[in-house]
């Protein structure tokens, strides 16, 4: 009995984990299916677009700016070991566009948006507002989930593009003011070495991360437990799941896009 | 007419409904009573399709609810939730006119607002309330807005889930009177869930008592006090001693 107990616990946890993945996958499939079927709630979509995109700009912008600056300093000090200080502009640009822009932008949106969506929908669930929607002949998936997930899929790549630009600017400010780079040479280097695919791949990642973040917010909100503790647990789970999914999918997408 | 036949529902090991049989005639006001956790709300949610029963049949005017066109079926209902369940992000009039602003019953915005204000007036609220948000209202006002939303699309059937919970006795009396007036005026079939006996006497034509997952007693409200059923007797008189076990 004592020997089999750990196995039983492991088995239960594994089955629970797999069942969770299954439920989340079905939820994602249902979201996509509802996306292509009318009605579409434009007002809710535009509100979500503002919440996910516009109101996330300050936090994503600041994160990108400081990351770009720190990246320039790191590359400069690391590159100095090989007399390769001149690669700072190109590596900052490529690093921001391919990796740091989408990943950090996605993580900041996960912290800000997945939590707020899960808390909002979770509270709606415990206060019976979701049941009320059903009794008012409104499908909660169409009214709550579809607008938010679509807004995330559209807004996050835009945030990533803005974040890329601000991050590169952060590197430029540090490069020119602290590391002694010539302003026009820094800009020329950035433009010469940055390719369209570097930016496009980051934007695709942004769209995937936006989908995952908003999906997790909605999924955990809709499956929130009872009371304040249930909503709190759902909020925490949404942020954790969204963050892990961002990092895992980032690896998969990088492998897909850049593995030789 | 709403007919429930042998309805069963469990949550894990907890058997909430164990073969409920109940008929609610058209145009009558049925009040379901019973202690907390006896499955009153689950029963109501089973009828609406918010919860799926494991066994049994629920019919409305002879039509199985599981086979009915969902939108058309729900369009026949209005519901007042226990905590009113108003949408925080919408103003009061948008909450009341929710059904009139989208879907099959969609009307122009100005017309929907007009209907919402008229329904707010019907439940005793002034038009100035229309542009406030639910968080700016007291509990009693929220219940009235919930009631206005329930009647906004002129439903045939209205459900009231614990309509007076959390209200002071005067406001509870106002809500009871409003429910009775509206039910009589609109000629709707009403089903109310409550354990407030004042509400029962004010609202009900007929009463059904739920206990142990079954309908323990059902009959006209006038016969309730004369019933010899010990469970009903203990419940309506609020006695601690009797066949219904109470946790002290």
Image (cartoon, rainbow, N blue to C red):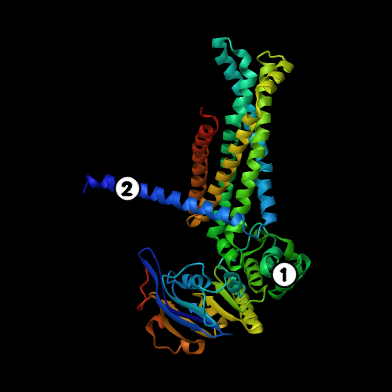
Residue at image point 49% right, 43% down: A241
Query: Residue B172, relative to residue A6: is it above or below?
Result: below
User: Looking at the image, which residue sits at the far front?
Assistant: A260
Q: In this rendered view, identify the residue nearer to me: A107 or B31.
A: A107
Answer whether residue B126 is visible to the viewer in this image: no
Q: Position of residue A222 (x, y in %)?
A: 53, 55
Residue B97 relative to residue B57: left or right:
right
Q: Position of residue B55 (x, y in %)?
A: 41, 73
Q: In this rendered view, identify the residue nearer to me: A170 or A230.
A: A170
Query: Residue A28, relative to residue B104: is it above or below?
Result: above
Label 2, label 1: how far apart the Cα atoms are? 55 Å
User: Secondary structure under badge 1?
Assistant: helix
Answer whether residue B71 is visible to the viewer in this image: yes
User: Looking at the image, which residue sits at the far right?
Assistant: B110
Q: Position of residue A145 (x, y in %)?
A: 59, 54
The residue that disc 2 covers is A11
Q: Position of residue B94 (x, y in %)?
A: 70, 63
Residue B17 relative to residue B101: left or right:
left
User: Secondary structure under badge 2?
Assistant: helix
Q: In this rendered view, identify the residue nearer to me: B14 or B33.
A: B14
Residue A234 relative to residue A178: left or right:
left
Location of residue A70 by image quarter: top right
The residue that disc 1 covers is B116
């Amino acid at each position: 009995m004592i020997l089999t107990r750990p196995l039983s616990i492991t088995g239960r946890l594994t089955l629970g984990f797999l069942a969770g993945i299954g439920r989340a996958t079905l939820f994602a499939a249902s979201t996509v299916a509802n996306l292509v079927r009318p009605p579409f709630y434009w007002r809710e979509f535009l509100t979500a677009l503002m919440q996910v995109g516009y109101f996330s700009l300050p936090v994503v912008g600041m994160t990108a700016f400081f990351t770009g600056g720190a990246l320039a300093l790191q590359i400069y000090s690391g590159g100095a070991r090989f007399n390769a200080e001149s690669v700072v502009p190109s590596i900052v640009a490529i690093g921001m566009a391919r990796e740091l822009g989408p990943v950090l932008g996605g993580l900041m949106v996960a912290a800000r948006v997945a939590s707020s969506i899960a808390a909002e929908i979770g509270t709606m669930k415990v206060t019976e507002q979701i049941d009320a929607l059903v009794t008012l002949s409104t499908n909660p998936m169409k009214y709550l989930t579809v607008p938010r997930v679509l807004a995330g899929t559209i807004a996050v790549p835009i945030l990533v593009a803005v974040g890329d630009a601000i991050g590169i600017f952060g590197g430029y400010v540090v490069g020119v003011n602290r590391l002694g780079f010539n302003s026009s040479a820094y800009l020329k280097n950035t433009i010469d070495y940055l390719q369209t695919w570097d930016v496009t791949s980051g934007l695709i990642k942004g769209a995937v991360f936006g989908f995952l973040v908003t999906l997790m917010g909605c999924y955990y909100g809709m499956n929130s437990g009872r009371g304040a503790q249930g909503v709190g647990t759902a909020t925490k789970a949404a942020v954790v799941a969204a963050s892990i999914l961002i990092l895992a999918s980032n690896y998969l997408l990088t492998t897909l896009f850049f593995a030789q | 007419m709403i007919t429930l036949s042998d309805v069963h529902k469990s949550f894990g090991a907890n058997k909430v409904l164990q073969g409920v049989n109940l008929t609610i005639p058209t145009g009558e006001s049925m009040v379901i009573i019973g202690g907390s956790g006896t499955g009153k709300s689950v029963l109501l949610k089973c009828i609406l399709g918010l919860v799926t029963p494991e066994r049994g049949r629920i019919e409305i005017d002879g039509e199985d609810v599981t086979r009915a066109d969902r939108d058309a079926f729900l369009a026949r209902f209005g519901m007042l939730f226990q905590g009113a369940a108003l949408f925080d992000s919408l103003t009061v009039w948008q909450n009341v006119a929710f059904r009139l602003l989208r879907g099959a019953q969609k009307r122009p915005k100005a017309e929907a607002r007009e209907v919402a204000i008229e329904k707010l007036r019907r439940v005793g609220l002034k038009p100035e309330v229309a542009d406030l948000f639910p968080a700016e209202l007291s509990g009693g006002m929220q219940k009235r807005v919930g009631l206005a939303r329930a009647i906004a699309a002129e439903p045939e059937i209205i459900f009231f889930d614990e309509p007076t919970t959390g209200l002071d006795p005067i406001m509870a009396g106002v809500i009871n009177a409003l429910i009775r007036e509206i039910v009589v005026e609109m000629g709707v079939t009403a089903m109310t869930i409550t354990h407030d006996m004042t509400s029962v006497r004010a609202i009900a034509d007929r009463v059904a008592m739920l206990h142990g997952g079954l309908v323990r007693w059902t009959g006209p409200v006038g016969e309730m006090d004369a019933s010899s059923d010990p469970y009903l007797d203990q419940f309506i008189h609020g006695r601690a001693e009797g066949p219904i076990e109470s946790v002290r």
